[in-house]
């Protein structure tokens, strides 16, 4: 959770807003076996990590296969540096981890668990420069401003740069329902409306409207939608084929 959304939570603490979901007590009981990310989160005594509980097993599901490998991961939104430390512990020493943030104060975390670069997620030249320094990117996790036009600007530049088989994760998408973040319920321009268009794009062979998101066209293999989070799988998509085998 970015510092921006954390501040918004605090603002609504006594107004019946999303702070009604806040939990600062002991680790809640889990109905199933805990995941490695959950264990690292709840045992954390280092820099602050602020996450919605239901994100933790999602991280484990999609990032788990990359553990112990030289994966190249870029996180948009450094905040207090805690999440970068979490990814280092989870992914291991071979991972190439970079974080970007518009707040100059985040430069203090550079060289700790990851490399940190200061700049805007809506600046195409800056984003390309960071990815070039990383030697490419396999995973992008957007936990930045949560403003819909910024999310889209980052996607337009970064998704084409993600390696084949890589992931593009965007979180805290509940902000897409808030006007101050360029959102609103079914409001045009909200990034969740963009996600709905992506679903149509995946099925473009079955209608006559074509693909509308150039950044993902022909390379969006799957969209996984969770409460406030979307995971996009990057892969070259071949035309579908079907066959019939066996006796009638």
Image (cartoon, helix red, strand yellow):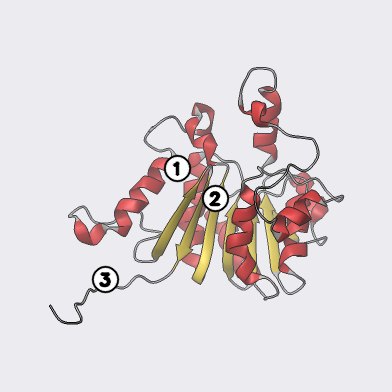
In which image quadrant can residue 39 be found?
bottom right
- Of labels 2 and 1, earlier in sequence is 2
| Left or right of residue 240: residue 92 | right
Tell me, yes or no, whether the two marked residues, 3 and 1, touch with CB atoms within 8 Å: no
Total labels: the figure holds 3
Taking the view exactly as shown, the residue that stands out farthest to the front is: 248
Q: Work out whether 89 lies above or below 171.
A: below
Figure quadrant of the N terminus:
top right
Q: Disc 3 vs disc 1: which is toward the camera?
A: 3
Q: Quadrant of residue 6?
A: top right
Which class describes the residues within 10 Å of circle 3: few (<14), some (14-19), or many (20+)?
few
Q: Is residue 8 visible?
A: no
- In depth, the one of 123 and 139 nearer the eye is 139
The residue to which callout 3 is attached is: 240
Residue located beneath label 2 in the image: 170
Q: Position of residue 197 (x, y in %)?
A: 34, 48
Q: Can residue 190 be seen here? A: yes
Q: Which numbered disc, 2 or 3, marks the residue that appears first in the sequence?
A: 2
Q: Judging from the image, what secondary structure is the residue with disc 3 in?
A: loop
Q: Which mark is residue 191?
A: 1
Q: Position of residue 224 (x, y in %)?
A: 46, 54
Q: Residue at x 70, y 74 (%)?
A: 68
SS type, badge 2: strand
């Amino acid at each position: 959770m970015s510092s921006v959304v954390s501040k918004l939570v605090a603002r609504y603490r006594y107004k019946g807003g999303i702070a009604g979901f806040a939990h600062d007590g002991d680790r809640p009981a889990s109905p199933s076996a805990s995941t490695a990310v959950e264990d690292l989160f709840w045992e954390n005594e280092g820099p602050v990590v602020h996450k919605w509980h239901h994100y933790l097993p999602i991280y484990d599901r999609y990032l788990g296969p990359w553990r112990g490998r030289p994966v190249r991961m870029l996180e948009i939104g450094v905040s207090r540096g805690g999440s970068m430390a979490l990814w280092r512990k989870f992914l291991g020493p071979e991972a190439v981890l970079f974080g970007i943030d518009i707040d100059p104060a985040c430069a203090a975390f550079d060289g700790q668990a990851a490399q940190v670069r200061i700049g805007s997620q809506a600046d195409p030249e800056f984003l390309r420069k960071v990815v070039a320094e990383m030697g490419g990117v396999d995973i992008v996790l957007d936990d930045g401003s949560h403003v819909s036009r910024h999310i889209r600007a980052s996607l337009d530049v970064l998704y084409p740069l993600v390696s084949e088989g890589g992931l593009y994760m965007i979180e805290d998408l509940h902000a897409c329902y808030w006007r101050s973040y360029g959102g609103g319920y079914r409001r045009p321009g909200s990034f969740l409306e963009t996600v709905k268009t992506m679903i149509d794009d995946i099925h473009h062979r079955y209608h006559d409207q074509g693909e509308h998101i150039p950044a993902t066209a022909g390379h969006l293999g799957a969209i996984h939608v969770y409460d406030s989070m979307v995971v996009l799988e990057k892969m070259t998509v071949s035309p579908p084929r079907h066959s019939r085998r066996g006796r009638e």
